[in-house]
Each structure stands twice: as C-alpha cells, then as structure tokens.
Amino acid sequence: MRTKDKIYVAGHRGLVGSALVKTLTRNGYTNLLCRTHDELDLTDQSGVESLFAEERPDYVFLAAAKVGGIHANNTYPADFIHINLAIQNNILMAAHKYPVNRLLFLGSSCIYPKAAPQPLKEEYLNTGPLEPTNRPYAVAKLTGIEQCWSYNRQYATRFLAAMPTNLYGPGDNYNLENSHVLPALIRKFHEAKVNQSASVVVWGSGTPMREFLYSEDMAEACVFLMNLDDQQFDSMLGSDRNDGIPPLINVGAGKDCAIRELAELVREVTGYEGDIQFDASRPDGSPRKLLDVSRLSNLGWQATTGLKQGIHSAYAAYLTNLGSSVA
Ligand code: GDP
C-alpha cells in the first residue's frame, strides 16, 4: 500500500477497525475512507455499491461485523448469521465489481471445529462439527472465507481472510450481557473493587482455555499482511481449482491460558482483593481454541504485547473512558 492509496476501513469504530485507523495513521497513510453506521448501513446492498462506485477504494479492510460474547451469540443467533452474511455479501461483491487491489476479510477462531486438534491449523477448516453456542456466527464467517476463495478462483481477485483469536483492547465492548470474557472481567473486577464486594462471579467452570491478542497487535498484523510482496500475498490466495488450503491465515499470540488464570490476572491488574466464584450454570463454550500461527510467523510477524501488559493498557483505557463519560 502506498501512503496515498485510498484505504477503506469497514467497521472503523469497532475494536479492530479503530486500532487499524490508529495504526494506518501512525504509519503515514493519509487517504482513509470510513463511514459510520448512520452514514452507511452495510447490510444495504445499493448503499454499499454506491460507496464503491463513487469512492473506488484501492484496498479494503473488512473489519465490520456483528460480534459478541458467548451469551449474545446464544441469544441472538438469527441476527448474528443474517447481519454478517449481508455485510460480507455486499462488500465482497462490490470489491469485485469495482475492483480493489487487495481485500482483507476478518473473522474469528470459532470457525474451526469444536473437537479439532490444538493448536488449530488453517487446514482443519470444515473437518468437523462446530461449537453450538456461536455456530451461526461461525457459519457466516466460513461462508465469507468460501466467498473470498470463490471470487479469487473465478475472477482472480486478491481477497484474503485473516482469522484472529479472541481480541481485546481500547474501545472494547464492556456491556456484561454481550461482551467477551476479557472486557467483562475488567469491568467486573473494577466495579467489585470500587464497591468493595466480597467476590466476583466468573461464568462457567474456569477451565476453558482461551488465547488473547491485543487489538493493536492485530491491526499491525493486518497492515503487515496487506503489505506483503505479490509473491507472498498471492501464494496465500487459494486461487487454484484444487482442494488446497483456502485463502486463510491465522492471527494469534501463540499461547493460551485457562479462564481461571485470566481471572486471577485481571484481579491482580485491577488491584481487587476479594474472592473469585465460578457460576457453573453459565456455558463454558469451546474447551480450547488456540491458533497455530506458524503460517504467519514464517512470513515474519509475531505479536509483541504480552497479556499482562495488554490488560494494563486496556484497563487504563477503560478508566480514561469512565472518566470522560462521568465528566
Ligand atoms: P467464546 O470465546 O466464544 O466462548 O466467548 P467469551 O469470550 O464470551 O467466553 C469465553 C469463556 O469465558 C467462556 O468459557 C465463558 O463462559 C467464560 N467467561 C467467564 N466469565 C465471563 C463473563 O463474565 N463474560 C463472558 N462473556 N464470558 C465469561
């Protein structure tokens, strides 16, 4: 990407999108194209087509999606499948019709089968049943990968799918009903400290294993991928007609921890001194989903923000935001 190229960040107010805007700006990219939800509803096909027809972006980061934690996915399955399918249908079609140089489609590690061997390699895709709590979201994202692959095969587009592990960072969703575990724990431990509560309730058994990546590391990885030379980028596109690996690359930190350990880390960072209780009536979800990141590390990228350091930064941003919303 040249610094003057027009770069469309779809979903620029989300966790990854906002980190992408920050990272791109820091790296000297000056021609960013962004639309808020009020300006453009990405489920509206003609609106999306008009944007591409008028603006003709050179590069697209497809970071817009309906996302949420285990409870939200379980409660609103129809919204999760419908909205995500609509967004990717519209943007991928428009990026083919008004050709872009490259497009990066973002998904999540829940696309892999529940019982797949760990760490999860790209080639384990579609080899078994999915985790039921987020299957509708996962099926939408799997369809997105197949769409990228199909466009690449039929029209020689350059659409690549990047699947991050669980992300967290500044600007995360801290709503306890629909957030992911890490922001939920930051909020719960912070409020328990302020209110001097005797204990904090953590959902499930505490035994599931999860891998966490700081959102700004994810943004760095996306920019790195978009800037690979043609030979490296094209080798990942899955454009041949054989049953090879789809145009897919995992993005993760390379190590995971139990939810119980995570809770202890968040307790330490927030300075809470009470107890931790586990609520077994809440679902555990997948037992483990650690990504195999060798494809990405062989290209020369690895995460730099340690989990404790990242939780400190996320907590600082959370406190700043609380301050500004009180002010
Ligand atoms: P998942 O990775 O799709 O399962 O999504 P989550 O990030 O929502 O949940 C990860 C794990 O953390 C699950 O085993 C949850 O039961 C557990 N967990 C523990 N406490 C919480 C909480 O307060 N909120 C959420 N969302 N998950 C929690």
Image (spheres, rainbow, N blue to C red):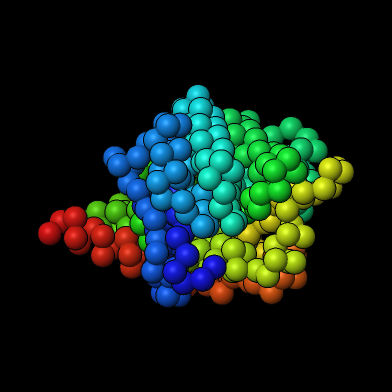
Q: Position of residue 30 (x, y in %)?
A: 39, 69
Q: Position of residue 287 (x, y in %)?
A: 67, 44
Residue at point 51%, 36% (across, down): 90
Question: Of all residues shown, which one is farthest toward the left?
Answer: 327
| Relative to 165, 246 lies left or right | right
Q: Position of residue 37 (x, y in %)?
A: 33, 41
Residue at point 58%, 30% (across, down): 136
| Relative to 162, 13 lies left or right | left
Question: Of all residues shown, which one is farthest toward the top?
Answer: 78
Q: Position of residue 142 (x, y in %)?
A: 66, 38
Would residue 278 be seen by someone viewing this image from the given angle?
A: no
> In this orientation, which residue lies closer to the viewer: 201 or 129?
129
Residue at point 52%, 40% (across, down): 94
Note whether 95 is above or below 25 in the view shown.
above
> In this orientation, which residue lies closer to the viewer: 181 or 139?
139
Q: Quadrant of the N terminus?
A: bottom right
| Relative to 57, 286 lies left or right | right
Would residue 216 be seen by someone viewing this image from the given angle?
A: yes
Residue at point 73%, 40% (across, down): 154
Q: Quadrant of the C terminus?
A: bottom left
* Quadrant in the picture for residue 95: top right
Circle count: 0
Question: Of all residues shown, which one is farthest toward the right?
Answer: 242
| Relative to 211, 94 lies left or right | left
Note whether 232 is above or below 142 in the view shown.
below
